[in-house]
Image (tube, helix red, strand yellow):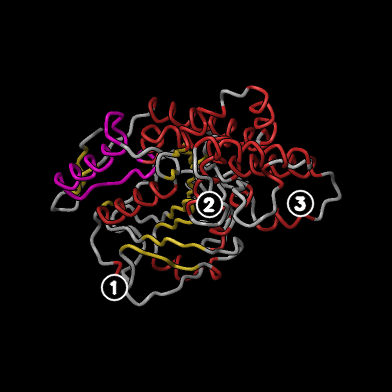
């Protein structure tokens, strides 16, 4: 299963043609039509990953759409905020436009939305489509993050944006978070059951729109409902054979992404450029911005350090996030197995020669 999830989708990096002029999306060398959908779960370092995909699309001449404000059911409701290598006259996207003009989609949407781009069983590779060896047309990618860290980062970000009352000192921020979490638990709430605007929910992105509607119609206790959504989210990670990145493990995650993208390069110089690009993200010694929100001297790390001094509160905090923690623990296991599959496997890139043949350049 892990090896299948990260199986290279071979396409050409720097292929001939001009997508800005609406050239065919079929790869001219492999004759394949892969499509990557990056589901940006809120406060998981997705901005960094968006930057990664923008750079990749620029180098490899792929067409990328970045969207926000989706209603999570159809692409028609999404707002296009930026794109790379797309026809100049595209201002809004829908399933047809994404199918005809784009190779990659990234943004705040949920699992299932990209299925309409390729409405076949190939969009969800674990479905019994009669061809178990076929590579899915839509490859889902997602980053997840430890939920306690994500919640603290969320609070700091919302304060920075002016959506919540600001605290002036580290001590006040710590006490504010303790008060919030204790109040939520006194009301029987879990992070997955919060309904206020800007709530940092994984379920918003990991459940399909149909699953959200079905779960809301269930006559269950609040905890039973959250437990149901948790299992559905885990099932989707499996069903969609998602390529899983972990915010706390960016270099390892990008290594998995690099393998899954599996590009054929069109020249030795392009090969070097692509390798240098990936090295900037996979090099453990490369300076990297901390994955966390901050307000001046108050950072996610400094708040967590103070919170961890209070054992009694941290027990309450862990109970508050326990269902999201189950999802992340499962995703971590998927991630580790995918990384091991990448390390065990052997994958070669190819350089297209002037006569159209391909010569192995290895890895």
Q: Tell me the number on the disc at residue 215.
A: 3
Q: Tell me the number on the disc at residue 273.
A: none
User: Foreground residue, 52 or 168?
Assistant: 168
Q: Is residue 350 left or right of residue 333?
A: left
**Residue under numbered circle 1:** 21
Regarding residue 137, the answer to whether it shows in the image is no
Tell me the mark number nearer the camera, choosing from 3 and 2: 2
Regarding residue 123, the answer to whether it shows in the image is yes
Q: Is residue 252 left or right of residue 119?
A: left
User: Foreground residue, 183 or 83?
Assistant: 183
| Residue 91 placement (x, y as % from top left) | 41, 75
Name the main secondary structure of what is drawn in magenta: helix
Image point 54% across, 70% down: which residue? 76
Residue span colored magenta: 258-287
Mark 3 and mark 1: span between their CA atoms?
A: 44 Å
Q: Is residue 121 left or right of residue 322?
A: left
| Residue 114 placement (x, y as % from top left) | 53, 58
Q: Earlier in the sequence, mark 2 or mark 1?
A: 1
| Residue 231 placement (x, y as % from top left) | 70, 39
**Residue under numbered circle 2:** 158
Query: In the image, is residue 221 above or below residue 69?
Result: above
**Mark 1: few/some/many CA within 10 Å (<14, 14-19, 20+):** few
Q: Earlier in the sequence, mark 3 or mark 1?
A: 1
Q: Quadrant of the C terminus?
A: top left
Residue 271 within the segment the image draws in magenta: yes
| Residue 168 placement (x, y as % from top left) | 50, 44
Direction bottom: furthest residue: 89
Q: Earlier in the sequence, mark 3 or mark 2?
A: 2
Q: Is residue 318 left or right of residue 44?
A: right
Secondary structure state at the residue bearing disc 2 = helix
Mark 3 and mark 2: span between their CA atoms?
A: 28 Å
């Amino acid at each position: 299963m892990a090896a299948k999830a990260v199986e290279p989708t071979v396409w050409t990096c720097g292929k001939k043609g001009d997508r800005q002029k609406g050239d065919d999306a079929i790869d001219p060398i492999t004759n394949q039509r892969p499509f990557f959908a990056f589901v940006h779960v809120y406060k998981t370092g997705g901005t960094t990953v968006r930057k990664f995909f923008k750079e990749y699309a620029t180098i490899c001449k792929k067409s990328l759409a970045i969207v926000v404000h989706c209603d999570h059911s159809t692409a028609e409701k999404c707002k296009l905020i930026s794109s790379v290598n797309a026809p100049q006259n595209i201002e809004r996207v829908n399933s047809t436009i994404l199918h005809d003009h784009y190779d990659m989609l990234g943004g705040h949407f949920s699992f299932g939305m990209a299925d309409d781009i390729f409405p076949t069983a190939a969009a969800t590779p674990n479905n019994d489509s009669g061809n178990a060896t076929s590579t899915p047309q839509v490859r889902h990618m997602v980053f997840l993050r430890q939920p306690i860290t994500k919640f603290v980062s969320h609070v700091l970000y919302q304060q920075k944006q002016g959506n919540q009352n600001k605290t002036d000192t580290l001590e006040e921020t710590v006490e504010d978070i303790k008060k919030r979490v204790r109040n939520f638990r006194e009301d029987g709430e879990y992070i997955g059951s919060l309904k206020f605007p800007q709530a940092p929910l994984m379920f918003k992105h990991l459940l399909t729109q149909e699953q959200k509607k079905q779960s809301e119609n269930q006559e269950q206790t609040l905890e039973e409902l959250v437990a149901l959504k948790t299992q559905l989210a885990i099932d989707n990670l499996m069903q969609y054979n998602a390529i899983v990145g972990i915010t706390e493990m960016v270099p390892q995650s990008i290594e998995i992404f690099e393998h899954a993208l599996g590009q054929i390069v069109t020249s030795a110089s392009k090969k070097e450029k692509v390798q240098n690009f990936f090295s900037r993200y996979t090099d453990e010694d490369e300076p990297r911005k901390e994955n966390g929100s901050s307000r001046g001297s108050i950072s996610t790390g400094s708040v967590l350090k103070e919170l961890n001094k209070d054992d009694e509160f941290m027990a309450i905090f862990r109970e508050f996030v326990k269902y999201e923690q189950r999802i992340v623990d499962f995703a971590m296991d998927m991630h580790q197995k995918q990384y091991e599959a990448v390390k065990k496997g052997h994958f070669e890139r190819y350089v297209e020669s002037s006569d159209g043949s391909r010569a192995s350049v290895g890895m």
